[in-house]
């Protein structure tokens, strides 16, 4: 096995490893590290022999810089998908806080943070949809195609691709507010109704006797109704993010 092929395999494994570090579902707490390592090695053994050999001087300094650059490229690619993937959990976190379930925090293994019960459930179901619809395979295929567009070791400065993160974060916030919009609107109307009743009968303390119960019940009812539409919108957003992988690489400086 030639030195150039060994270097190329290291570059390929570094970029794929960067993607797996932040890839939805596979970066979840509880996924065995050995599973990710075996996936990286399997993909490297398939992809490396079919891509152009890396044009990297085999010195320690050049190899360390090239490997670090490839890992950063993979992290940027995976981040574009992961940020959009978090829009559903963020939307339901808004909902959870508005309907009074914010105090019941659960650990979300997908995003590795504590969320309300509804957002944690939505995040787990979104991971199931991501894997069940083979979006993870589409993402890996697009990542494999990037080695033909941008060969291993040819990226000089990957920071330019990070500009997509700014755009994606804006899209995540916008999508989260849109998916949570029906529940937020319903809660606002309930608060207006309770405010009018409280003004008419200030001695009855209607907010605690009626407002909280009405908000919880109506909010959960609305969540059940809109959750299928939320998953459809989320699936479309993640699919678009997966298809953006070549565009992310086009922003990076390549020799």
Image (spheres, grey):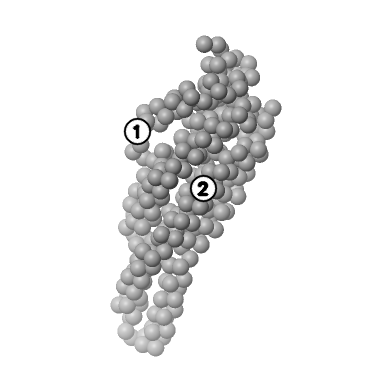
Report the front residue among 104 and 17.
17
**At which x and y percent is residue 7?**
55, 18
Q: Are marks 2 and 1 in contact (CB under 8 Å)?
A: no
For image coordinates 33% across by 52% down, the residue present is 106
- Within 10 Å of disc 1 (Cα), the crowding (few <14, some 14-19, many 20+) is few
Q: Secondary structure at mark 1?
A: loop
- Residue denoted by label 2: 239
* Mark 2–mark 1 distance (CA, rounded to whole Å): 26 Å
Q: Is residue 81 above or below residue 190?
A: above
Image quadrant where residue 55 sits: top right
Total marks shown come to 2
Q: Single out the residue that lies furthest toward the right.
A: 255
Q: Which label belongs to residue 89?
A: none
- Up/down of 99 relative to 69, above or below: below
The percent coordinates of residue 47 (x first, y second) are: 52, 25
Residue 246 in sight: yes
Going 60% across and 48% down the picture, which residue do you hit? 166
Q: Position of residue 56 (x, y in %)?
A: 62, 19
Sequence-wise, the earlier of marks 2 and 1 is 1
The residue wearing badge 1 is 32
**Residue 100, visible in the rendered structure:** no
């Amino acid at each position: 096995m030639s030195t150039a092929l060994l270097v190329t395999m290291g570059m390929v494994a570094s970029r794929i490893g960067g993607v797996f570090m932040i890839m939805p579902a596979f970066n979840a707490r509880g996924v065995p590290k050995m599973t990710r390592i075996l996936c990286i090695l399997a993909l490297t053994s398939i992809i490396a022999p079919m891509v152009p050999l890396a044009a990297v001087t085999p010195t320690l300094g050049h190899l360390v810089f090239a490997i670090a650059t490839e890992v950063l490229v993979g992290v940027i690619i995976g981040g574009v998908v992961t940020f959009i993937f978090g829009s559903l959990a963020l939307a339901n976190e808004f909902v959870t806080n508005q309907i009074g379930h914010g105090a019941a925090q659960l650990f979300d293994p997908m995003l590795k943070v504590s969320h309300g019960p509804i957002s944690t459930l939505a995040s787990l179901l979104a991971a199931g949809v991501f894997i069940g619809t083979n979006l993870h395979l589409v993402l890996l295929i697009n990542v494999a195609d990037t080695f033909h567009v941008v060969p291993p070791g040819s990226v000089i400065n990957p920071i330019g691709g990070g500009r997509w993160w700014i755009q994606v974060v804006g899209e995540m916030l916008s999508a989260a507010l849109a998916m949570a919009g029906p529940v937020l609107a319903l809660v606002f109307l309930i608060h207006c109704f309770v405010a009018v009743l409280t003004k008419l009968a200030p001695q009855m303390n209607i907010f605690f006797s009626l407002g909280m119960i009405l908000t919880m019940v109506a909010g959960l009812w609305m969540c059940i109704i809109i959750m299928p539409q939320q998953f459809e919108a989320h699936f479309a957003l993640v699919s678009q993010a997966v298809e953006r992988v070549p565009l992310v690489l086009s922003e990076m400086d390549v020799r």
